[in-house]
Image: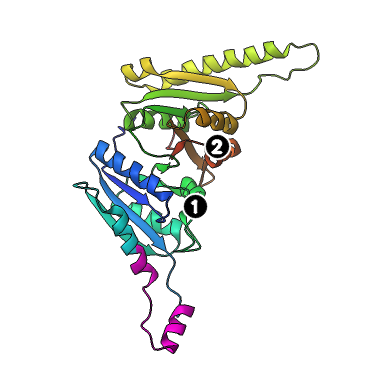
């Protein structure tokens, strides 16, 4: 079992919208907690050969306007002003958003990508809000999708699990990145057999819970967590849809962090819990950390 450590380098992918301010605040807080370097990246579309505004300016004898890249860099530096002694580097690139973010993250050795969920049509038609799903599926490092204000470090972390090797890695990662937080292992279970005529539905549900409890106990043992983590780990086992259960939890507990995992499927990273987790990522009220899976250990 490889040792998981907090990232020494964090990449913030921002589209400079107001909602991305929340991702910036969270990235700054994490960088301070982990003593990590923070790179703030914004990606804009390549400049057209000659924009309509440039044509009008040339026709009237006026100077051409500010380029997209220069405008984005100006706004990015303004957003980052006032962060004090934090090692923070601004960077603007042009190109396809997802490819550029992943390329820069790999080149810089980033151990975490942080992003928001907003759009900003003033800078580009293709923005981070439309590529979070692609980043979640393709990023080789954890991706943190921020929705809420970063008022303090994460105190409660809910790790969704289907008891697979990939979810084992997600739990270990959450324990390593947030040692001061209370961890909850969450599993949504189905009925173990159909509730056909003559079968008590309550008994079917009780049997499903009993099976989930046995599986959770074996899963936790297999994770080989530090003793203090294993002893304080909470379990949340409930019958129902993963996405809806997490959505309702987030409405009541918006400050919690939800952790989802991915695993390799035919050479393409797919969300660990399939379509249900895909829906959870889309409708969650919480910040969501997507952890890429590793080879079974």
Label count reads: 2
Q: How far apart are marks 1 and 2 (CA)?
A: 16 Å
Magenta-highlighted stretch: main secondary structure? helix
User: What residue is rendered at 36% in x and 31% in y?
Assistant: 154
Crowding at dot 1, Cα within 10 Å, few <14 / some 14-19 / many 20+, comes out as some
Up-down relation of residue 143 to residue 15 (above or below): above
**Who comes first in sequence, dot 1 or dot 2?**
1
Up-down relation of residue 293 to residue 219 (above or below): below
Query: Which residue is the site of mark 1?
Result: 129
Query: Which residue is the site of mark 2?
Result: 280
Q: What element carries label 2?
A: helix
Q: Where is residue 42 in the image (x, y as percent from the top left)?
A: 37, 58
User: What residue is rendered at 43% in x and 18% in y?
Assistant: 234
Q: Position of residue 123 (x, y in %)?
A: 44, 64
- Residue 78 circle label: none
Q: Where is residue 32 in the image (x, y as percent from the top left)?
A: 25, 39
Q: Position of residue 258 (x, y in %)?
A: 46, 33
Residue at the limit of the structure toward the left, as seen here: 85
> Would you say residue 7 is visible in this rendering?
no
User: What residue is rendered at 81% in x and 15% in y?
Assistant: 197
Query: Is 32 inside the magenta-drawn segment?
Result: no
In the displayed structure image, the side of residue 20 where residue 285 appears, left or right: right
Q: Is mark 1 on a helix, strand or loop?
A: helix
Query: Is 61 inside the magenta-drawn segment?
Result: yes
Q: What stretch is highlighted in magenta?
A: 52-72
């Amino acid at each position: 079992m490889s040792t998981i450590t907090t990232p020494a380098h964090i990449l913030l992918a921002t589209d400079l919208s107001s909602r991305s301010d929340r991702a910036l605040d969270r990235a700054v807080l994490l960088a301070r907690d982990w003593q990590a370097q923070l790179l703030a990246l914004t990606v804009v579309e390549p400049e057209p050969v000659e924009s309509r505004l440039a044509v009008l300016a040339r026709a009237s004898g006026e100077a051409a306007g500010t380029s997209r890249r220069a405008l984005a860099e100006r706004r990015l530096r303004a957003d980052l002003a006032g962060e004090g002694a934090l090692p923070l580097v601004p960077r603007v690139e042009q190109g396809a958003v997802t490819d550029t973010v992943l390329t820069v993250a790999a080149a810089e050795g980033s151990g975490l990508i942080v992003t928001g969920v907003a759009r900003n049509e003033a800078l580009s038609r293709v923005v981070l809000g439309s590529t979070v799903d692609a980043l979640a599926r393709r990023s080789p490092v954890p991706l943190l999708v921020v929705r809420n204000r970063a008022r303090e470090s994460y105190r409660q972390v809910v790790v969704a699990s289907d008891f697979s090797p990939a979810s084992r890695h997600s739990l270990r990662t959450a324990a390593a990145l947030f040692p001061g937080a209370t961890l909850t292992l969450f599993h949504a279970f189905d009925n173990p057999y159909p509730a056909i005529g003559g079968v008590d539905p309550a008994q079917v549900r009780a049997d499903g819970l009993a099976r989930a409890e046995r599986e959770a106990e074996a899963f936790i043992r297999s994770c080989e967590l530090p003793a203090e983590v294993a002893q304080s780990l909470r379990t949340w086992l409930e019958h129902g849809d993963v996405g809806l259960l997490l959505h309702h939890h987030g409405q009541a507990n918006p400050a919690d962090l939800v952790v989802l995992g991915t695993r390799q499927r035919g050479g393409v990273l797919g969300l660990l819990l399939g379509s249900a987790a895909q829906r959870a990522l889309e409708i969650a009220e919480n910040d969501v950390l997507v952890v890429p899976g590793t080879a079974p250990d």
